[in-house]
Image: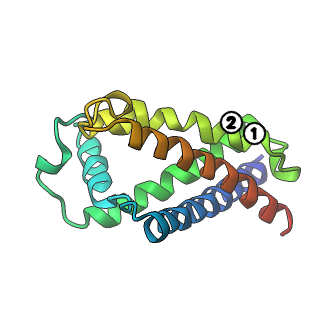
Amino acid sequence: MAGDMFDIIWKSAAVGVGATVLLDIWAVILTKVFGQARPNWGMVGRWFLSALRGRFAHENMAEVPGFAHETAWGWFFHYLVGIVFGWALLIIWPAWAANPTFWPPMIVGWVTILCGWLILSPGMGGGIAHARRDNPTTPRLLNIIGHTVFGLALWMAGLALKGL
């Protein structure tokens, strides 16, 4: 039993980190090719540290007093979430790691859009699905594309893991 749990933990970490790295590469491509701003992990870290202190929602994250090392905490949270989603994939589809098929990670990738739209965006002052942003369509489309990339990256990470 303990061996099975360890197996799920390390595979979740491998798949989640691998997919998150590929998502970060996608962000670099968006910046270099299309001039899209990179994600602000400092603001995410600020939200994460505020949430750890019991405050989950803010009117405007930029007006919240900063924390020491908030950018590092934002990156930590970003990768932790990737690992949690890798874990969810393996818990829901336990046999997936042995035979990584396309649809399970895509479903996880698309469902995770809701986490950003219903937790992170409202928590940082952007409203549900970025409704309080000046042009909510742009971040919504970027979220859909980014989480599709994340689903594809989960699948690729699973294929790489199977090859080990």
Label 2 crowd bin: few (<14), some (14–19), many (20+), radius 10 Å: some
Question: Element under label 2?
Answer: helix
Depth check: give the residue in front, 42 or 148: 148
- Coordinates of residue 120 in the picture (x, y in percent): 36, 39
What amino acid does circle 2 point to? Ile
Q: Which residue is mark 2?
A: 107
Name the residue furthest front.
Answer: 34
- Coordinates of residue 53 in the picture (x, y in percent): 23, 43
| Tag 2 and tag 1, C-beta contact below 8 Å | yes
User: Does residue 6 appear left or right of residue 23 in this picture?
Assistant: right
Whether residue 114 is situated above or below residue 69 in the rendered picture: above
Image point (84%, 46%), residue name: 101
Image point (42%, 61%), residue name: 76
User: Does residue 27 appear left or right of residue 158 in this picture?
Assistant: left
Q: Which residue is mark 1?
A: 104
Image point (54%, 50%), residue name: 146
Task: Give the quadrant of residue 93.
Answer: top right
